[in-house]
Image (spheres, rainbow, N blue to C red):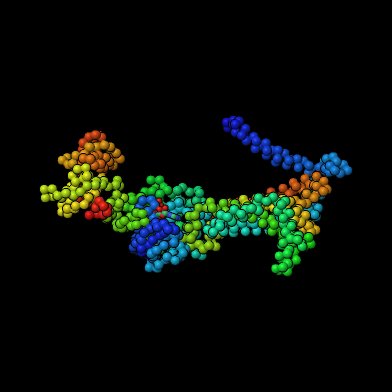
Amino acid sequence: MRPNTVGWLMLAPTIAILGIFGIIPFIYVLYVSFHQWNPFGASPDMIYNGANNFRRLVFDTEFLTSIAFTMKFAFFAVLSEIALGYLLAQLFMKEFPGRGFFRTIHTLPLIVAPIVVGSVWRLMTTPSIGIIPYLLKSWFGYDLNIGRDATAAFALTVIMDIWHWTPLVTLTLLAALLALPKEPFEQAQIDGANRRQIFWHVTLPMIRPAILATVFIRLMDALRTVDEVWMLTSGGPGAATRFVGLHIWKIVFPKTDYGYGAAISVIVLYLTLVMCWLLYVALVARRERKRTF
Amino acid sequence: MAHVTVTDVTKKYGALPVIHGVGIDIADGEFVVLVGPSGCGKSTLLRMIAGLETISGGTVAIGGRVVNDVLPKDRDIAMVFQNYALYPHKTVADNMGFPLKLKGAPRSEIEAKVRKAADILDLGKLLDRYPKQLSGGQRQRVAMGRAIVRDPQVFLFDEPLSNLDAKLRVTMRVEIKELHQRLKTTTIYVTHDQIEAMTMADKIVVMRDGRVEQIGAPLDLYDRPANVFVAGFIGSPSMNFVPGRLSMASGQVNFVSDKGTVLPVPEGTPDHGEPVIYGIRPEHIDVRPDGLSARISVLEPTGSETQIFAHLGGDPVMAAVRDRVAVTPGDTISFRIDPYRAHLFEARSGRRL
Ligand SMILES: Nc1ncnc2c1ncn2[C@@H]1O[C@H](COP(=O)(O)OP(=O)(O)OP(=O)(O)O)[C@@H](O)[C@H]1O
Ligand SMILES: [Mg+2]
C-alpha cells in the first residue's frame, strides 16, 4: 500500500461531515440511552442506569403497539408504492401524447416538505371543511371522520404516504426500465413467452436490484415517519396512528425523557436493520441457487 | 422445417422507407445468407421475418402460412442475436431450457433436450454457470443451444459471430455449418462479412439500400456478378474496376480505358458504344513475361500470397499472386490477364453486359 495523503485529504470533508452529523450523534444517542436524563425534571443530571431503559421498553405496551402499527403502516405503504410505482413507470415507458408533461408533474409531490404534505392533507380531510369528506359524503354517502374512526385515520396515513412517495418509486423503476437492454425481451417473445411470463421471468428479475434498493429506502423512511402523520392525525384517534416516530417524539419532547427516548431510537434502528437484513436474505441471497430443473 | 417465402416486402419507419420490395424464396432446409453493407436493411428484414418488426407491405410466409399478423412466439422460429441476448439472471441450463419451460414441457424432457444440445455444443460443464461467468464464444454457443433446443422450423441468425475474435469466428463458422448439415433446419443468416457468406451459404442474397442486388449460389455470384456492386462486394480482395470503352481495332474488340490502357476481352464480345467498366479480380491477374507492363507502387506480402498494387498505364490495379516474386516498389512488372476471367459492366447502370 502506498501512502495516499492527497486521497485522504480529498475525503476529509466527507469524513468530517459524516462524523459530525452521523457518527458522533449516533454514539451520543447510544450513550444517552444508558442513562436516566430528564434535564427539565426534578433531577436534571444524567444518571447512569445500565440497561434499565431497555428493560422498561419491553414492558411498555404503548411502545409495542406503536411498533405494530408502524410495521403495518410500512407494509401497506411500501407494498402499494412499489406496485403503483411500477405500473406508473410502465405507463411512462409507453408513447402517448403529453408523456413528457406527465412524467414531470407526477414528481411534484416529492418536492413538497412532509410537514406541508401533512398540513394540506389535514385541511383536505377535516370534517365539514375538507374536500375529501365532502366528496365521499355526496358521492357514496360515507362519513369520513379521521378524528373518530381509527381505521379511516390509519388508511389515510397510508394513502398520504403513497401519494407523497410513489413518484420516487416510479422514478427509480423508470430509470431501471429505461436502462434494460431490449434483446432479452425480444428473445423472450421469440422463445414463446406471453406478457405475463415476460413480466415474471424477464422484467422482474432484471429490475430486481432497483426494486430492492427502492424497497429498502422506502421501508427505512416509512419506519421513521413522523411529521406528516403528526400534522394529519397527531397520532390519533387514540393510538391508531401513533407510529413509533411519534411515540419517540412524545417521550422526548413533551415528557423530556431523553434517556428513554434514546433507548427507543436505538431499538428502532436495530429493528430496522434486522428487517432489512431479513429482506436481504430472503430476496437477494436466495439468488445464488442452482438451476430450476 | 419449412420453406420461407418473402414476397415484395417493404418497411417504412414513419415516412422513411428502408426496405423497398424484397422477394426471396427459401427452400426447406436451405442455408441462406443475407449480406450487404451496414445499414442496408438486413437486420430489419430478418426482424420482420421473426415478427419483431411490423411488415409495412408484402407478405412473409413460413411453411406456406402467411405470418404477417402472427406473434413471434407463434411463428415457431429461433433467433440468435449479435450480442446473444442471454437472460443474465438465469443459468446456462435455464437459459437453454426456457423456451421448453414456457411450453410447459415436463422437467424430464427439458433435462434431456438441454443435455443433448449441451453435448452437441460441448457445454456440458457450463450448465450451472451464469452468462456473466462465460467467455464470448461460450455465450455464443449457449445462444445457439437455446435455439437448437427449440427444434424450430427456422433458425434466424443476426451477425452471431461479429463479437468474436477472428480465430474463434472461423471455428464457430465451421461449427454452425456442421450443425446445419446435421439438423437440416432452414436457416437465415445475416452478416456483413462476405467471407462468412461465401463459406456458409447455400444461397446468398446480396442487399444494398433496402433492395436485393442479386440472389444466387456463392460461386455463381463470384463467377457471374449481376452488377458492379455485387462484383465489388463478393470476393476478397475485391475486384479491380477500370472505366473505359470497347473499341473495334483490326477486326477485334478490345477494351480501352479512359487513360488509354488496352485490356483483353473474351472473343466474341459485342461492340458496345456506351462507356463500360472493366472488372478483373486480383487473383486472375498473373505475373507472366510478355504481358502488359505495370509499375509497382506497393507490395503487401501476406505469406500465402502477395498483393501487388501497380499502375497499368494510368490505371491502378491490384494483383494477388501465390508465387513469391522478387520485385520492389518502383520496378516494372509484366501482368497477364485471362480475357475469359474479365467482367464487363455497363457504366451507366452498372449492370453486367
Ligand atoms: N427504429 C428505427 N427507426 C428508424 N430507422 C431505422 C430504425 N431501425 C433501423 N433503421 C434504419 O433502417 C436501415 C436498415 O437498418 P438495419 O439495422 O436493418 O441495417 P443492417 O443492414 O442490419 O446494418 P448492420 O450491418 O449495420 O447491422 C438503416 O438505415 C437504419 O438507419
Ligand atoms: Mg444489423
Quadrant of the drawing holding the N terminus of chain B:
bottom left
> From what the image shows, is residue B348 above or below residue A35?
below
Which quadrant of the frame does ligand 1 lie within?
Answer: bottom left
What percent of the width, then of the height, locates residue A109? 65, 53
In the foreground, B228 or B97:
B228
Residue at image x 26%, y 46%?
A: B240
In the foreground, B40 or A223:
B40
Residue sitting at the far right: A42
Residue at image x 73%, y 49%?
A: A268
Q: Is residue B267 visible to us here?
A: yes
Q: Is residue A72 left or right of residue A173?
A: right
What percent of the width, then of the height, locates residue B209? 36, 54
Residue at image x 44%, y 58%?
A: B14
> From what the image shows, is residue B51 above or below residue B267?
below
What percent of the width, then of the height, locates residue A132? 71, 62
Residue at image x 17%, y 53%?
A: B271
Query: Quadrant of the rendered structure where residue A105 is?
Result: bottom right
Q: Is residue B166 left or right of residue B276?
A: right
Q: Is residue A64 visible to us here?
A: no
What percent of the width, then of the height, locates residue A170? 60, 54
Query: Quadrant of the rendered structure where residue A139 is?
Result: bottom right
Task: Tell me how many marks there are.
Answer: 0
Quadrant of the drawing holding the C terminus of chain B:
bottom left
Query: Quadrant of the rendered structure where residue A69 is?
Result: bottom right
Q: Is residue B89 left or right of residue A136?
A: left
Residue sitting at the far front: A129
Q: Is residue B185 left or right of residue B298?
A: right
In the foreground, A74 or B154:
A74
